[in-house]
Image: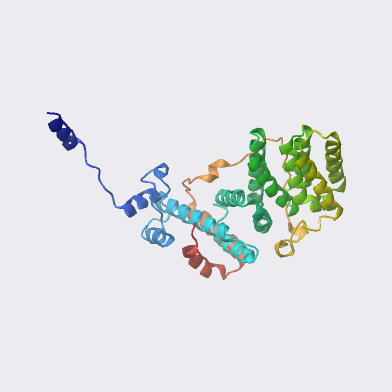
């Protein structure tokens, strides 16, 4: 009887329908399947496949087509950010500007911050890339600055040393590129040294090592006040010996005029000082992170806005940018 019951239950159980994975991906990209079910319905979507699907949509203003272009834009931006290095940064900047980075400004900011979080030692490269884009579209630079400050505040409140040390390298690189005012650097150091701990002092040493050269040039008095505070902490002797040695090492770096830590490497000095737009953001102000820009939203004026960006792109890159942008989209991958 038990065997018969189990057999009957198995027969009554509904069979799972195996759907074509490409069909699932297509439904996800067009919004038929909720994006929460997976990035592309649990399947990687190659750029060429997405391009084929886009070419098959007749209504270019439909939500289906807009969502597909959003996915393609995300893949293109991620692919370019993941490829950037010192030798190809100029070409990557051009390729990024061929994408609609006004529509995808939050995608670009998220991609840069994710890449920087994974590789903090490449902060100078990501800041240099952003510095060039900031001269043309300062709203992108401002958004990244605000999100970097917010990330630091959250990590500081949670006593997350790893994230703190990573994000201060990004903020230091932004100070070096004059993307953010030096007052933020002073605020950050004051906060960390107000009630010094081994971790907070170590974070300050990391930060000043990275952007001390820039601070010495634009605000030497502020830099002197930071070193005076470090000197008093050193004399108090309340912190760990390892951190005391780090402070002494920082004094040696300062004595050499930060020779091994220049503000901007020559190959990353891509923006004239007078062309840069500096953002003034404070640690204690309420910041609008514009988080709604992270997700796809239907645009009733999609075609007009896309045409407007084409005009902006031509103004920045020249008329020959149109013929090359289509080829680049197919090559980019995340």
Evaluate whether residue 311 shows in this view.
no
Which picture quadrant has residue 285?
A: top right
- Determine the residue positioned at 15% across, 33% down: 8
Return the x and y of residue 39 as percentages of the image width and height.
43, 48
Residue 296 to residue 236: above or below: below
- Determine the residue positioned at 59% across, 50% down: 118
Return the x and y of residue 127 as percentages of the image width and height.
67, 54
Q: Nearer the viewer, residue 138 or 79?
A: 79
**What's the colour scheme?**
rainbow
Evaluate whether residue 162 shows in this view.
yes
- Determine the residue positioned at 38% across, 48% down: 42
Q: In the drawing, does residue 219 fall left or right of residue 104?
A: right
- Determine the residue positioned at 75% across, 53% down: 176
Q: In the drawing, does residue 273 fall left or right of residue 141?
A: right
Quadrant of the frame with the N terminus:
top left
Return the x and y of residue 54 as percentages of the image width and height.
40, 58
Residue 194 to residue 71: above or below: above
Return the x and y of residue 3 as percentages of the image width and height.
14, 32
Total number of numbered discs in the rendering: 0
Furthest residue in direction top, as rendered: 1
């Amino acid at each position: 009887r038990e065997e018969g019951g189990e057999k009957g239950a198995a027969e009554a159980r509904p069979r799972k329908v195996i759907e074509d994975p490409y069909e699932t991906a297509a439904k996800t990209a067009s919004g038929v399947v909720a994006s929460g079910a997976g990035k592309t319905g649990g399947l990687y979507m190659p750029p060429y496949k997405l391009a084929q699907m886009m070419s098959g949509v007749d209504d270019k203003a439909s939500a289906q087509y807009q969502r597909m272009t959003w996915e393609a834009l995300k893949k293109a931006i991620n692919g370019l950010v993941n490829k950037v290095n010192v030798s190809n940064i100029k070409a990557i900047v051009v390729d990024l500007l061929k994408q609609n980075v006004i529509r995808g400004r939050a995608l670009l900011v998220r991609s840069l911050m994710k890449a920087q979080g994974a590789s903090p030692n490449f902060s100078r490269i990501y800041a240099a890339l952003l510095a060039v884009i900031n001269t043309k579209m300062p709203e992108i630079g401002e958004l990244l600055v605000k999100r970097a400050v917010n990330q630091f505040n959250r990590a500081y409140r949670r006593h997350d040393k790893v994230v703190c040390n990573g994000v201060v390298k990004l903020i230091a690189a932004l100070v070096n590129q004059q993307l953010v005012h030096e007052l933020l650097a002073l605020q950050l150091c004051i906060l960390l040294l107000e009630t010094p701990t081994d971790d907070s002092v170590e974070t300050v040493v990391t930060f000043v090592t990275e952007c001390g050269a820039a601070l010495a040039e634009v605000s030497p008095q502020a830099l002197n006040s930071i070193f005076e505070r470090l000197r008093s902490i050193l004399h108090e002797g309340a912190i760990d010996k390892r951190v005391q040695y780090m402070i002494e090492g920082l004094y040696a770096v300062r004595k050499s005029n930060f020779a091994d830590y220049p503000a901007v490497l020559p190959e990353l000095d891509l923006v004239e000082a007078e062309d840069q737009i500096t953002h003034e953001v404070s640690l204690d102000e309420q910041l609008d992170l514009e988080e709604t820009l992270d997700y796809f939203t239907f645009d009733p004026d999609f075609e007009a806005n896309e045409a407007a960006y084409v005009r902006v792109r031509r103004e920045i890159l020249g008329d020959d940018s149109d013929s090359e942008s289509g080829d680049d989209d197919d090559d980019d991958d995340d």
